[in-house]
Image (cartoon, helix red, strand yellow):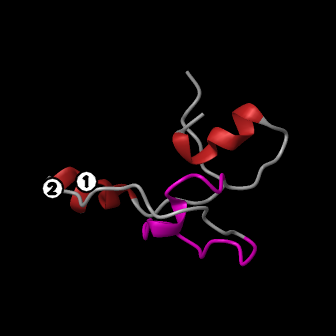
Amino acid sequence: MSVLHNRRKHSRSAALDPLSSAGSFNGFASPLPATFRSIGPPCTAAATTWLLKSGWQQRGLIRLTEGPASR
């Protein structure tokens, strides 16, 4: 699973990981659940390349239910 769904790997909960940077990510197709709360300050750096800034959006925004394709 992706980092987005890291919590699913470590627990039975399908909720977003409160230690993730999901709260500061603006690429979700729908708003985060009202119950989601991030713990601590965001630990992210500003994107500096085209791919990280906007290129990934050519495939569309990310749904909260998405995961990597199966092999």
Provide residue 70's location: percent of width, then percent of height: 59, 27
Which element type, helix, strand or loop, lies under badge 1?
helix
**Which residue of the protein is positioned furthest toward the top in this rendering?**
71
Which residue is found at the position 23% from the left and 61% from the top?
53
Provide residue 57's location: percent of width, then percent of height: 33, 61
Q: Residues within 10 Å of mark 2 (few under 14, many from 20)?
A: few
* Residue marked by disc 2: 48
Q: Is residue 33 left or right of residue 47?
A: right
**Which residue of the protein is positioned furthest toward the right in this rendering?**
12
Give, as a single range, the part of the protein colored magenta.
17-35
The front one of 4 and 42 is 42
Q: Quadrant of the N terminus?
A: top right
The front one of 5 and 11 is 11
Indicate which disc residue 21 carries.
none
Q: Is residue 20 magenta?
A: yes
**Which residue of the protein is positioned furthest toward the front in this rendering?**
40
Q: Quadrant of the C terminus?
A: top right
* Residue marked by disc 1: 52
Q: Amino acid at mark 2?
A: Thr
Q: Given contact means CB atoms under 8 Å apart, are the residues at marks 1 and 2 in contact?
A: yes
Which element type, helix, strand or loop, lies under badge 2?
loop
CA distance for labels 1 and 2 = 7 Å
Q: Is residue 68 magenta?
A: no
